[in-house]
Image: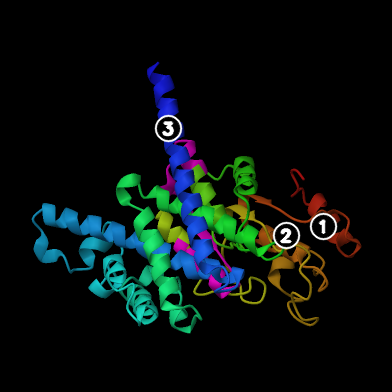
């Protein structure tokens, strides 16, 4: 009976979380509808969620220091960063933003807060939007409403901080659907990522995603390790993303989960500016853009070492450029799982590359 009660209690708790995620999303979408384009929703909302999350962690650490009789260290960054907590100046804290939510310069205050957070925490460099809210054509009352929605519905005592990660993931999924087919390239469905993780079993070593989007592959990889009682400290994460705004989403997503990842110095095209040239990964997970055209100029990358021993991938379609990039990054015992369009199986321009991959015994399953 005790086991049954535990299951029922857990189910009720999960339903409560789902309801919270849905209610918060619906409130925010309603506030933004008609004020900004649907494609902007995620860029308006997710930094606010991130700010709320890191502020809550900061306040808990601050209280912990006080309880331990270390009040004189409350404004020393080292006493936060040693426990993987981001240090925040007073003007960068969620409490300050809430207090000033209805001020006429709330956009400027938000931009200043996010800028200061990056300055005080080098690991977040390039993660947060740069002067975004000041440039956004959104009234102060709309921004104040967003702040109120988040402040009134998310409380740290409701659950562990994993709740914020789930909210972030839920929002990414909903925003991708909202943008429509072909627009939501920053998000790969969780079911697809889970399937790849179950296939290649990334327990320990280096994990690489050459087109990492918002970082979903990394999040699900670490969830896989935790579900199988493994040690997430045995994994190192490497990724690359070409779009600036999506690169920022990925860095925020990893930071929310406590994942220390190397996404390169900045957003960059994987083919033109490879951020991990010498990487040899134990596991590669990817969902590259399907049938990408004109991915290089006709004269570019013909002698690139990533396709040494193979035909040069055609300019007309990048599918096999992605595959050969993946092959070149694998360690001697590495395994890759990735998603491509069906057309990659019978493209006449890449027939020779397909034969070479099979002859090199690199294909385990399709």
Range of the magenta residues?
224-252
Q: Is residue 227 above or below residue 344?
A: above
Report the residue marked by disc 3.
10
The C terminus lies in quadrant: top right
Report the residue marked by disc 2.
323
The N terminus lies in quadrant: top left
Q: Nearer the viewer, mark 3 or mark 1?
A: 3
Report the residue marked by disc 1.
344
Q: Is residue 207 visible?
A: no
Other-residue count near label 1 (Cα within 10 Å), few / some / many at <14 / 14–19 / ≥20: some
Q: Nearer the viewer, mark 1 or mark 2?
A: 1
Q: Position of residue 365 (x, y in %)?
A: 75, 43
Q: Residue at x 61, y 40 (%)?
A: 198
In what element is the residue under mark 3?
A: helix
When asked about the image quadrant of residue 354, the answer is: bottom right
When asked about the image quadrant of residue 144, the answer is: bottom left
Q: Is residue 23 above or below residue 273?
A: above
Q: Is residue 32 magenta?
A: no
Q: Could you say which is closer to the camera, residue 74 or residue 156?
A: 156
* Label 2 or label 3, whichever comes before in sequence order: 3
Q: Are marks 1 and 2 in contact (CB under 8 Å)?
A: yes
Other-residue count near label 3 (Cα within 10 Å), few / some / many at <14 / 14–19 / ≥20: few
Instruction: Name the side, left or right, on which 176 lies relative to 121.
Output: right
In what element is the residue under mark 2?
A: helix
Q: Could you say which is closer to the camera, residue 293 or residue 131?
A: 131
Q: Position of residue 123 (x, y in %)?
A: 38, 68
Q: Is residue 150 visible?
A: yes
- What is the spatial separation of the Cα atoms under label 3 and label 1, in whole angstroms? 43 Å
Q: Residue at x 35, y 57 (%)?
A: 152
């Amino acid at each position: 009976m005790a086991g049954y009660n535990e299951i029922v209690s857990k189910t009720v708790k999960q339903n409560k979380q789902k309801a919270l995620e849905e209610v918060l999303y619906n409130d925010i979408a309603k506030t933004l509808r008609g004020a900004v384009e649907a494609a902007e929703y995620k860029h308006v909302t997710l930094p606010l969620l991130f700010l709320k999350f890191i502020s809550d962690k900061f306040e808990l650490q601050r209280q912990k220091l006080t309880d331990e009789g270390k009040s004189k260290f409350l404004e020393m960054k080292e006493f936060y960063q040693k426990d993987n907590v981001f240090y925040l100046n007073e003007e960068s804290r969620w409490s300050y933003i809430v207090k000033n939510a209805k001020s006429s310069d709330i956009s400027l205050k938000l931009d200043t807060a996010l800028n200061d957070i990056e300055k005080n925490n080098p690991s977040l460099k390039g993660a947060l939007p740069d002067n975004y809210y000041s440039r956004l054509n959104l009234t102060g009352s709309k921004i104040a409403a967003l702040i109120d929605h988040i402040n009134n519905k998310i409380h740290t005592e409701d659950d562990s901080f994993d709740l914020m990660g789930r909210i972030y993931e839920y929002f990414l999924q909903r925003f991708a659907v909202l943008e429509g087919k072909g627009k939501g390239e920053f998000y790969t469905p969780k079911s697809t990522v889970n399937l790849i993780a179950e296939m290649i079993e990334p327990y320990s070593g280096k994990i690489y995603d050459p087109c990492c989007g918002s970082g979903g592959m990394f999040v699900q990889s670490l969830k896989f390790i935790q579900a199988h009682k493994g040690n997430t400290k045995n994994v190192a994460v490497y990724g690359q993303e070409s779009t600036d705004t999506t690169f920022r989403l990925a860095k925020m997503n990893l930071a929310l989960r406590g994942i220390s990842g190397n996404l390169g110095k900045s957003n960059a095209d994987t083919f033109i500016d490879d951020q991990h040239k010498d990487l040899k990964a134990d596991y590669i997970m990817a969902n590259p853009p399907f049938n990408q055209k004109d991915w290089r100029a006709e004269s570019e990358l013909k002698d690139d070492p990533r396709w040494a021993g193979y035909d040069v991938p055609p300019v007309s379609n990048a599918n096999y450029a992605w595959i050969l990039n993946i092959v070149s990054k694998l360690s001697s015992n590495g395994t890759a799982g990735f998603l491509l369009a069906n057309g990659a199986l019978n493209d006449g321009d890449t027939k020779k590359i397909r034969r070479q991959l099979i002859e090199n015994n690199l294909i385990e399953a399709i």
